Amino acid sequence: MPQLKTSADLRVHNQTRLLRAVHDADEPLTRASAARALGFGRNTAAALVGELEAAGLLHEAPAGASGRGRPTTLLLAHPHGPVAFGADIREDSWTLAQIELGGRLTELETGEHDRTPRVFDDILRATRRHATDRLASLGIAIAGPIHDRRRLHISHLGWDEVDLDEQIGGDWPPTVVDNDARLAGLAEARRGALRGTGTALHFHIDFDIGGTLLLGGDAQRGAHNIAGEFGHMPLTDSGHRCMCGAQGCWSLDVGTNALVRRSGREPGYGAGRELAREILARAEAGETEAGRAVDDNAIALGRGLGALANALDPEAITLSGLGLELIRLRRGLIEHACAEGLMKFRRARPPRILAGTVGEIGPLRGAAEIAFDVALNAEWLRARL
């Protein structure tokens, strides 16, 4: 708990806690349920709700008739309250969305890009087209490591030491950029299958595989903000040289490019995604060659998960992106390969391997969530009350 010097500090602290509880809840809270969860008295809760509604930050509305007695009211996003934008940059496209208190996500715009850092200009222009004075912040998910939060590397696009200060520039809106796999894991912890899990791993599989370790719902960053590059560990003895410069990376055996390569075709970013969908469909239809390619991908995924489970001891592991299709089609192979890689004493209680429930929008939702965190900060709130 932060140091609170005055009664005003305590009030803003409690207002922030209340907004966070409303935002994080599975379903809309009532004033009474919020008070119980936060340990507030009835009068304190009423005062806090009234102050936040007067400030245009929260709205209390009837829940609808449910029988006799006084109608229940719900704590909801104020129609003029703060919003944040989230953007997800894929290798050849981008999406911009808006999030409001309570987590409702609304897609605003999509576009294609030329695979250069000029995509940041596209996103900032789209942000200005849709922005109002309600906008608190912008979060961007990107498929690459970000060193010390400001230097971006995406080897397969030829981006090396891209200076995010130069690309984003300006001081409005406040903007944060983070790795897509880390944000997908954060989305699962806040809104999906990992909610309430103490120690977990999440892996987002697209052209290759990236992941994050989550402790108590927080995605771990490491000393230089680049923790979670699990795809660049030699977990499966690949004989190929990775574009990152390392030999034998796990990501060479897991993901869209590995699937395309194993089917005897040339992998490639963008087109590779469509080829992978074709291979998955043929495998599901029973075609032998395509089935082998999917089998190899699933086995390599499971082997790596087993190795990481030995090291990090997660309660659960979730998958998103291509991982959703792999676990749907080859759950047994993934779990068997994982178990084979586990230390013997771990096999009686292996980590649960789950399909993520946030889905393909995990990176986008995660980006919007970290952007909206700005509006759930006591300093931001104090300036607006």
Image (cartoon, rainbow, N blue to C red):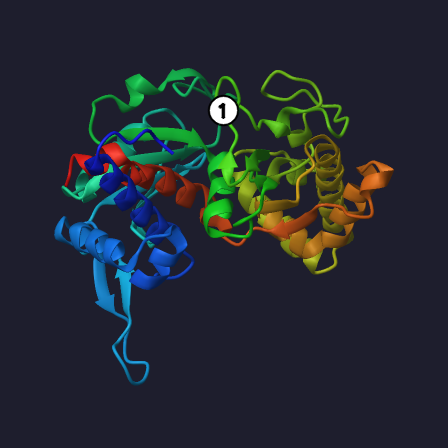
How many numbered discs sit on the rendered protein?
A: 1
**Rendered position, 66 above or below 278:** below
Q: Position of residue 152 (x, y in %)?
A: 43, 20
Question: What is the quadrant of residue 215 in the picture?
Answer: top right
Task: From the viewer's side, name the closer residue of 177 and 280.
Answer: 177
Q: Position of residue 304 (x, y in %)?
A: 72, 35
**Rendered position, 194 above or below 183:** below
Q: Amino acid at mark 1?
A: Pro
Q: Is residue 304 left or right of residue 147?
A: right
The answer to whether one can see residue 317 in this image is yes
Quick one: quadrant of the C terminus?
Answer: top left
At x 21%, y 24%, the residue is: 171
Task: From the viewer's side, name the closer residue of 113 and 51.
Answer: 51
Q: Residues within 10 Å of mark 1 (few under 14, many from 20)?
A: many
Q: Position of residue 374 (x, y in %)?
A: 29, 36
Q: Which residue is mark 1?
A: 145
